[in-house]
Image (tube, coloured by chain):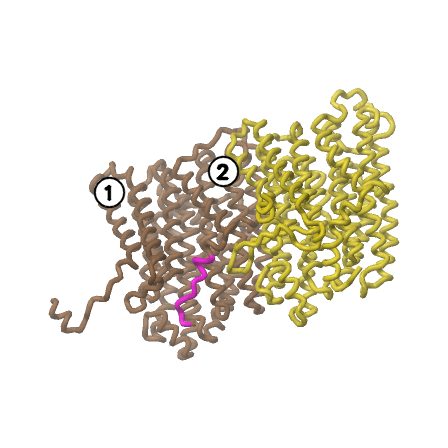
Chain colours: A yellow, B brown
Amino acid sequence: MNTFLHDWGLAVITFLPLVGAAVMMAIPRAEEQLQKIVALVASTAALAVGIWILAEFDYDRAGSMQFEINRRWIEIIHSRFSMGVDGIALPLLILTVAIIPLCVIYSWNHIPSPGNAKAFLILILILETGVIGSFVAHDLILFFVFFEIVLLPMYFLIGVWGGEQRQYAAIKFFLYTLFGSALMIVAFLALFWLSGANSFDMTELHNAARVPGALSNTAQVLIFGGMFVGFAIKVPMFPFHTWLPDAHTQAPTVGSVILAALLLKLGTYGFVRIAIGIMPSYASHKWAPVLVVLSTIGIIYGALGCLAQTDMKRLIAFSSVAHMGFTMLGISTLTDFGINAAIFGMVAHGLITGMLFFVAGSMKERYHTLELKRLGGLLVSAPKMGWILGFCSMASLGLPGLAGFWGEFPAILAAYNPAEGLSKALFRTCMVIAAIGTVFAAGYLLWMFQRTSFGTPKDEFADDPHITDVSRPEWIAWTPLLISIVLFGFLPGLMFDVTNPAVKIVAAAAGIGG
Amino acid sequence: MGGLIAAAGWAPPAMDWHALAPEVILAAGICVLILVDVVLLERGKAFASAISGLVLLAAVVPLLTLAVSDDTSRSLFGGAYVVDRSALLLKALFIISGYVTVLLSTNYVAEGEYWESEYYTLLLSSVLGMSVISSSRDLIGIFIAFELLSIPSYMIAAWRKRDTRSQEAGFKYFLMGVFATSVLLYGMSLLYGASGSTLLSKIGETVESGRATPAVGLAILFVLIGFGFKISAVPFHSWAPDTYEGAPTPVTAFLSVASKSAGFVAILNFVFYCFIQNSSATDVVVPVVFVLSALSMTVGNLIALKQDNVVRMLAYSGIGQAGFILAPLVVAHDRLSDALPSIVVYLVIYSAMNLGAFGVVIAAARKTRSAEISSMNGMLQWAPGLTVLMSVFMASLIGIPPIGGWYAKFSVWRSLLQGATGWSYALAVLIAINTAIAAAYYLRVTKAMWFEEANDGDVTPVDVPPSLRLALAITVVATLLFGIVPSLLTDAAAVPLALGH
């Protein structure tokens, strides 16, 4: 059995959700209960395989690719079906397989209008396949294919089940991302031809790109630029972030959760694994100042954006821009310290902001509005949910002892001492500004918590019987996330130990040590 | 008589019947159809569609046996007719496209009170012409095949004879087609005059030797323009939208896929056998192709944005796609082994996804009696299966992995970037921009189907007859399969050409 896992485990975990989606397509739409069960079984099965991989993973070799698959795929373009997982991909893989079943459970009684559980859940499962595949692909073309699979289901999730402005948000999301991927694939192709690797395998490209004289400095910078646009849109980094508030605000709750927890991570993961992981250090060093400046602007801009919002969901969306700014700040230092922090930050942001969107969605269902000035007194009308919101806000602002802290604080710290060859003055300036950003974060999150939860409920909702406390599916979906936030807050080593060996290799490959 | 022939030293050419079997079967099938119509009269109508379907399937059999036989490059009639693996792949494309068209037509023609057996006779004749043009390596062969595939299509474009728009469609198509033919013929006669031979390979030698360059340059221009009408490349595209909208929808599907591919095949034969071996010819081909390609994709896509009718939108999108398909020709002279397969791959995938899209339009129109995009509103509620299929085809046309179209576009991109000339980089960038433009209008269709409410709340399901189901199944399987496992297609298309390069 174990050899099977080592030979095929990643293919199984990638395609299990797709099999579930295929089964669901064969079941008539009227059998709604059955549809939900199949979706739950498929996503839980993927989770089970994920846990099994977690158990079988060789932590002493966390720096190297494991569970490798390498099969013939498209011979003529030298692209192979090659997958693998190392310390960087493992946490994100597990995050993905854990979040989706929780989303399915949350959807049990919450299929947003206009209904149609079948289509809704099928799209989520297809989405899961795309995200898992992107995290485990070890071939650029395969990565690209999975990266794009994500696009359509999300477009439909936003466009069909979203809010008032859903069509605008859906098309904006789609076109933005498509534009980014077009430049990205051109960069991939240029890398392929110019490096002379004759393969799209990430390791081989990495080696070929380092042969002296293989890539001119200009080519390096341009190729990195193409990748930068593709990934920066996905992250999203300032100034490519404008699709995010619309998409987040309009998406159905589960869509927002998946978007925040998983989809944004594809961008940052791409930076670590592909842009910095493959390109020679010259390109990374040329682009690092751009990254650090843009992420610092993102941190401040996101925070100021939050303070200007009147809608709770939009506020959380802008906080994502700020948080992903911290992640990118860590990455831009090109040190193992910073990149470790970034990966921790990705997972922490996935857990925390995912939770915030869950709570916001549940509140929207009860209040039918998320306008901050109409909300208030959540702690009175639904105390448990109020406390959960408070807990998540604390986690999100980076309270020590909760997961958010370990993504933010080390990232800022890393900027004090960026990789050799990068301007210390610039990075330290950005560090100071980013640190101020954390104060803003505390400001807007506490402000949001205060506006929604303190005081007494507004008259219109004072005796509203719809405002009930946390329901059972909500408890089941949320408890694992809440526990993880505390667990990783107290024992950050759980993740740092896994990511560190792999990150060291990436950081060393960028031509620098930690 | 026999003595006379012997005295003239004439011997009948050696016939390779195996190589000719697909065409023979098609020709025999056409005769059977006519006979059935003449003998059984009204009663024969019921069999016409079935017979033509069977004939087309029967014609696939020799293609398979030829593909597995040892002799994969057969040359007949002194090199005027060549059956190699790329010709086989293209014949398979035409015959299977023809089969899908028959499936799309079955209910449409039977329920519309049109002439039935004549329709199928003409359709098969057109497919026969396409099959011949894939193998022709001779001016006369190409011309006859080209007319054989064109003339029947003028007639079936006007098949909805009680509708003036259909008459306009056929007439416009006919006039433009005849004009194109005359331009083409002029180009061909110049080529013959310059080289003294009708064989493409002989003409290629003359072109290579650099003799008579001005005449050859003019000839190349005329030939490209002549076929440019067929593939509806801008600025020779003006017939396409009106013809597509007015013609019966299955015929439109056929024109936009098979007929267009045939035009491309003819261009490929000319470019690869005549024009690429000499730098002065390349000097003509590359700029002309660049202009045609850049204009087609940009103009086609921009006008498609404004369309409210699905069929017209697909017509303009087909013009845009023609620009993509032409693009690799600008690097053909030094990237032959990449440019040709990428065009063939594109044609195959384009045919599958476009036929599929038309199939859905035909199926949906059975309920809505309309081809307006707004008539597809709320299709998710009244035809979820068709909605998913159409979304797959639209996603494929945009080029989203892992659905077929991505690989087509990718392979074009790949050969352009590999070619690494100023022309090719410019086209690669244009394709990137046009992909984003095209996404906007393809998404309008998905938007109507998924996001809008059904018109008047009418959610009665649509009845899709079995033949249409089969057509949709064939096209969706092909579209998905070629996207997920492109090597199925590339292995067949990447055959080195018997060119002596």
| Secondary structure category for the residue under label 1 | helix
Closer to the camera, B285 or B29?
A: B29
What is the three-letter code of the residue carrying label 2? Answer: Leu
| Secondary structure category for the residue under label 2 | helix
What is the three-letter code of the residue carrying label 1? Answer: Asp
| Badge 1 density bin: few <14, some 14–19, many ≥20, Cα 10 Å | many
| Badge 2 density bin: few <14, some 14–19, many ≥20, Cα 10 Å | many
Instruction: Give the residue displayed 65% in from the left and 49% down from the top.
Output: A135
Magenta stretch: includes residue A98: no
x%, y% of residue B482? 48, 51
Q: Is residue A110 left or right of residue B38?
A: right
Quadrant in the rendering for residue B435: bottom right
Instruction: Give the residue displayed 57% in from the left and 69% down from the top.
Output: B421
x%, y% of residue A264? 70, 47
Q: Which residue is mark 1?
A: B37
Q: Is residue A297 left or right of residue A279?
A: right
- Residue segment shown in magenta: B490-500
Q: Is residue B171 left or right of residue A256?
A: left
Q: Which mark is residue B386?
A: 2
Q: The residue marked by circle 1 belongs to what chain?
A: B
Closer to the camera, A511 or B84?
A: A511
User: In the rendered view of the protein, which quadrant contains the C terminus of chain A?
Assistant: bottom right
The majority secondary structure of the magenta stretch comes to: loop
Q: Is residue A255 visible?
A: no
Asked if residue A120 is positioned above or below residue B299 in the image, the reply reads above
